[in-house]
Amino acid sequence: MAASPLISGLMEALRTLPGVGPKSAQRMAYHLLERDREGARNLAGALTAAVDKVGHCQRCRTLSETELCTLCADTGRDRSLLCVVESPADVEAMEQYTDYRGLYFVLGGHLSPLDGIGPEAIGLDRLEALLDEGEVAEVVLATNPTVEGEATAHYIGELVRPRGITITRIAYGVPLGGELEYVNGDTLSHAFSGRREV
Amino acid sequence: MAASPLISGLMEALRTLPGVGPKSAQRMAYHLLERDREGARNLAGALTAAVDKVGHCQRCRTLSETELCTLCADTGRDRSLLCVVESPADVEAMEQYTDYRGLYFVLGGHLSPLDGIGPEAIGLDRLEALLDEGEVAEVVLATNPTVEGEATAHYIGELVRPRGITITRIAYGVPLGGELEYVNGDTLSHAFSGRREV
Ligand SMILES: [Zn+2]
Ligand SMILES: [Zn+2]
C-alpha cells in the first residue's frame, strides 16, 4: 500500500457506502483529490448538513428536515388515503412511478420478532393514533413482497380492520422476494393500479 | 421528487463520485441517513482532512500529505531506478502487482498539446532536474498504452537519452487502448518483467 494515511483513510471511509468495493473506493479517492476537490468539499458539507439536520416527519415518519415532510405539508394530497411502506426510498418509488396522490406512513423496516423488532419499533402505535384521527378511509399496504413484509402487512391489516377502514394491498406484479425500491417503474405502476382489497 | 432539499442535496453531491448514477446516489443517501450516520460523519471528516492536507510529494509528485511520500522517504528503495507513470493510482497498481523496488515519477496526466498540456504541466522540468542529480541509472516508462501515453513516453525518452541513462518501456501485455490502473494484476506483472530497452 503506497497511499498515505489520509488517502487510505478516505478510501476506507468511502467503502462504507453501499456497493463500493476497494477498487471503486480507490478510484473515487484519486478522482476527488486529483480532479475534483471542490466536489469533495461539497460532499463533505452535504453529508454533515444532512446528518445534523435530517430527522423524521412527525406524521409519516419519513426522513425530513422539517417537522412535517413535503408530502404531509402538501394540502393538495388526498388525506383519506394512507399508503404504508417500509422505507423512504419506497415513498420515492411510489411517487415517481405511480399516480398515487394520498399520504404515506413509513415503517422504517418490518416486524422481526427474532431481532427484537416489534410493533412499536416500526411505529405502529403512531399509525394507530393516526388512524384514530378519523381522516383515513383506505389503507394501502405496500410493504415489500418478502416473507417479513407479508407478515407485517398481515399484522397491520389486523390493526386496521376493526376500525372499519378499507384495506388494500398492491398487486403482485412486484417479483416475490424482491425489494420495492429496486423494482422497475412499469412493474410498480402496474402493481399499484391492480391493488385489491384484503 | 419527494425528498427534502438536504436529502436531494446529498444525493446530488454523491453523484459527483465517479460511477455513481441517480439510483446509487439515492440508495447511498438513504443508507447513510437511515442506518449509518456515524459512517456519514466519518466520511465527511475523511474528505475534509484529505482535501485540506493532501498535496504532492516534492520529489515524485504523487499525492502525499507529507513533503516526501512514503516511497520517496523509504531508504530501502533502489534510487537508481525511476518508473514514470501517469497517475498515483498507477503507482498503487505497480506496487501491488509487480516486484518493482525503485522510485516513481508521477506525471499527473500526459502531454496533450491541443488541451494546452505541455511538458511543464506534467512536471518534465522537475523530472529533468531529478535526472540531473545523477542517481538514476534506468528510467522505466510506464505511461498508459494509449496514443497520448505513447507520445508522452516517446517525448520523455528523447529527454532522457542524451543523459546516457538506460530507458525501458514496460511490455505490451497491457491491452492497447486500456488504462494501466484497470488492468488485471497478472497482465501488469507480466508487462513489467518483460520491459525492454527503448
Ligand atoms: Zn410526512
Ligand atoms: Zn514521492
Image (cartoon, coloured by chain):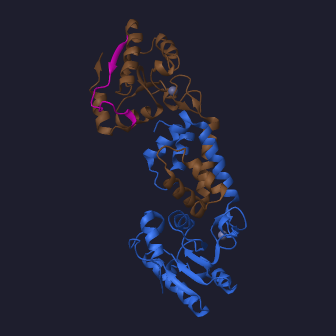
Chain colours: A blue, B brown
Which sits in the foreground, B116 or B182? B116
The residue range painted magenta reads B165-181
Farthest residue, direction right: A67
Give the x, y percent position of residue B2: 61, 62
Give the x, y percent position of residue B27: 52, 58
Which sits in the foreground, A89 or A15? A89
In-image side of B28 versus B95 (left or right): right
Q: Quadrant of residue B175?
A: top left
Farthest residue, direction bottom: A162
Say above or below: A125 vs B162: below
Say above or below: B157 vs A66: above
Say above or below: A2 vs A142: above
Farthest residue, direction top: B162
Give the x, y percent position of residue B55: 59, 31
Residue A28 in sight:
yes
Location of the C terminus of chain B by quadrant is top left
In-image side of B104 versus B99 (left or right): right
Is B164 a magenta residue?
A: no
Q: Residue placed at 51% from the left, 29% from the top?
A: B62
Which sits in the foreground, A173 or B143? A173
Q: Quadrant of residue B189?
A: top left
Is B167 a magenta residue?
A: yes
Q: Quadrant of residue A179?
A: bottom left
Which sits in the foreground, A168 or B83? A168
In-image side of A137 versus B123 (left or right): right
Location of the N terminus of chain B by quadrant is bottom right
What secondary structure is the stretch in magenta mostly built from?
loop
Give the x, y percent position of residue B93: 40, 36
Q: Residue placed at 57% from the left, 36% from the top?
A: A36
Residue A118 in sight:
no
